[in-house]
């Protein structure tokens, strides 16, 4: 970038930004402007050419996704650097300590989780006794997918894609539950919930929020936008400033500072110690080693830092005021949101009892003071590498899990070459599990995983990818030319081995007798495989969420057959 102050454009900033955030940025020597509508924003992006644009994704002034699409397609703005920042106290009705909604799920939707929420929220439907569910979402493709799921489970879906018609439809249809998207142009989900609560005729309707936004969270790559994204109920000034500094490459206006590494490349370390000199010495050394470092001088500050920043690892001094290191560690391990964070305890004491207490709580490592910086860095890297592998590997199949799956699909999208994604699901697996037990079900999952590896990875040079979404769902990423032959070979090979899962009596009968998901006694055929094949040969794929939604849709069509089928997407739009 050239010399002169860095330029930041706020696009329809959320309330409070002009008095809270924007003056702070101006004080740092940055030139800050705002645009309040779509056309004004595009004009500023083209003519003023800001170094960074900050977009309010919850704006009701226009559709922010339309703006992002035009920015990416316009040759004058396609390289524009953008971050997403939205804050609203209304978010507390969804994620607060006393939420006013019956549930909150992120897209792409886990339909089993949605089914569970619906059963808790409304009466259980049955043939001849449907339960009405209002689906309020401006995404027609996603709405159709949800509609298919609801109809298959005996619900009566009423779909509204226009947010301005949601409340009126709720009055007339009187649904027993509502599935509501938060981010819709013209009227967001928060306003809709307020209007529903204001009327006695609609205040009773339980609402389940479905959103591609991660509320009260920071994402390096938002599912909806693919951009760095902060969406919270409060105004996290320090977090936003850090994000802006990282995007601009430094804090000095007009400077030529080297760009800070993106959050994904810089693991975040919390270092807590009440010795100030040691604290800042270790902070400097860790930053030089490529880490982002958050500091705390006592146990109370350490707890606050974890809640505000969610570090990748915590290095805690054992002997700190307010809360000692083990007390902080115990509090974190008891909190399901932070129990996964690995912890290193630094102590001047070497008592065996102290170490045993910490190890029994799940402490990952102990270091005796004085701490050697090189050893600490090496141990942090080792623990982070191990933790990533553990968190991302399915414990049953040992295949990569959802983070790796999303990263691989997004990598294929960015490459721009032809690729295909096979969404693989076992048919009649629940009935098998109910009859033979979970141990036998686990053997089927392991066998399926091994079969996919054997058929997909033909040699050590293969670049194909296999992942385990969870349960009996798998995914394969391959080239378009290999996708259909691979789907055929997987189905044929599985059909050959499937009878071996069953007892001689069931093999002779050709089926098993069990209960379906509604509790009805039925005969079930043997387990087969259904596959939905998503690809970009006929139409572009722009996001992981899009790929996931299409895959789920195609898999459902494949399962509608007699078993052992695949469906390949042949649509051009």
Image (cartoon, rainbow, N blue to C red):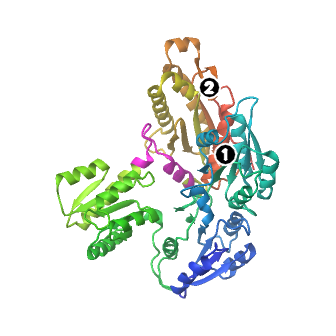
Label 1 secondary element: helix
Query: Does 500 lie within the magenta span?
Result: no
| Quarter of the image that includes the N terminus | bottom right
In terms of depth relative to the viewer, which is nearer, 246 or 450? 246
Is the residue under label 1 in contact with that under label 2 (CB below 8 Å)?
no
Q: In percent of the image, x 60 and y 81: which residue is there?
A: 19
Image location (x, y in percent) of residue 446: 45, 32
In depth, the one of 353 and 515 nearer the eye is 353
Q: Which residue is mark 2?
A: 519
Q: Where's residue 341, x and y in %? A: 39, 55
- In the image: residue 35, left or right of residue 374: right
Q: Which stretch did the figure color magenta?
A: 390-410
Label 1: which residue? Answer: 550
Q: Position of residue 284 (x, y in %)?
A: 33, 74
On screen, 8 above or below 350?
Answer: below
Residue 391 shown in magenta: yes
Q: CA distance from mark 2 to mark 1?
A: 30 Å
> Residue 523 placed where, x, y %?
62, 18
Residue 63 position by quadrant: bottom right
Q: Quadrant of residue 125?
A: top right
């Amino acid at each position: 970038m050239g010399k002169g102050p860095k330029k930041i454009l706020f696009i329809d900033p959320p309330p409070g930004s002009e008095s809270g955030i924007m003056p702070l940025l101006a004080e740092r020597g940055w030139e800050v402007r705002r645009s309040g509508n779509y056309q004004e924003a595009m004009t500023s992006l083209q003519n003023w050419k800001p170094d960074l644009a900050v977009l309010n994704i919850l704006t009701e002034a226009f559709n922010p996704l339309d703006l992002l699409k035009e920015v990416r397609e316009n040759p004058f703005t396609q390289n524009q650097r953008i971050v997403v920042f939205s804050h609203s106290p209304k978010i507390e009705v969804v994620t607060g300590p006393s939420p006013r909604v019956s549930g909150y799920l992120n897209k792409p939707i886990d339909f089993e989780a949605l089914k569970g929420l619906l059963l808790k929220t409304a009466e259980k439907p049955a043939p001849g006794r449907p339960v009405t569910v209002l689906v309020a979402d401006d995404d027609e493709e996603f709405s159709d997918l949800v509609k298919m799921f609801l109809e298959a489970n005996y619900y009566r879906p009423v779909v509204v894609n226009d947010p301005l018609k949601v409340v009126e439809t709720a009055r007339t249809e009187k649904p027993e539950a509502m599935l509501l998207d938060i981010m819709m142009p013209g009227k967001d989900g928060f306003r809709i919930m307020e209007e529903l609560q204001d009327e006695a005729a609609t205040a009773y309707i339980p609402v389940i929020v479905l959103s591609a936004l991660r509320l009260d969270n920071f994402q390096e790559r938002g599912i909806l936008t693919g951009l760095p994204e902060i969406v919270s109920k409060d105004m996290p000034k320090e977090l936003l400033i850090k994000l802006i500094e990282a995007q601009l490459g430094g804090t000095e206006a007009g400077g030529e500072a080297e760009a800070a590494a993106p959050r994904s490349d810089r693991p975040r370390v919390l270092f807590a110690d009440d010795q100030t000199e040691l604290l800042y010495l270790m902070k400097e050394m860790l930053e030089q080693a490529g880490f982002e470092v958050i500091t705390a001088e006592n146990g109370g500050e350490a707890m606050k830092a974890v809640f505000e920043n969610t570090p990748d690892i915590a290095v805690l001094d054992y002997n700190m005021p307010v809360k000692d290191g083990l007390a902080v560690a115990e509090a974190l391990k008891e909190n399901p949101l932070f129990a996964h964070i690995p912890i290193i305890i630094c102590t001047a004491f070497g008592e065996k009892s102290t170490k045993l207490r910490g190890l029994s709580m799940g402490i990952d490592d102990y270091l005796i003071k004085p701490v050697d910086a090189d050893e600490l860095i090496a141990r942090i890297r080792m623990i982070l590498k191990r933790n990533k592998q553990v968190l991302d590997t399915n414990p049953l199949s040992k295949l990569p899990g959802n983070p790796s799956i999303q990263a691989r699909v997004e990598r294929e999208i960015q490459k721009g070459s032809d690729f295909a994604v096979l969404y693989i699901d076992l048919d009649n697996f629940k009935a098998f599990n109910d009859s033979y037990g979970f141990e036998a079900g686990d053997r089927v999952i392991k066998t399926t995983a091994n079969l996919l590896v054997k058929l997909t990875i033909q040699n050590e040079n293969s670049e194909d990818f296999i992942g385990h979404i969870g349960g009996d769902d798998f995914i394969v990423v391959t080239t378009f030319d290999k996708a259909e032959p691979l789907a055929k070979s997987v189905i044929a090979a599985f059909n050959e081995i499937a009878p071996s899962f069953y007892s001689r009596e069931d093999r002779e009968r050709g089926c098993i007798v069990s209960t379906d998901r509604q509790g009805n006694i039925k005969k079930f055929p043997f387990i087969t495989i259904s596959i939905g094949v998503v690809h970009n040969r006929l139409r572009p794929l722009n996001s992981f969420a899009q790929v996931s939604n299409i895959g789920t849709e195609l898999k459902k069509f494949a399962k509608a057959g007699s078993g052992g089928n695949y469906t390949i997407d042949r649509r051009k739009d």
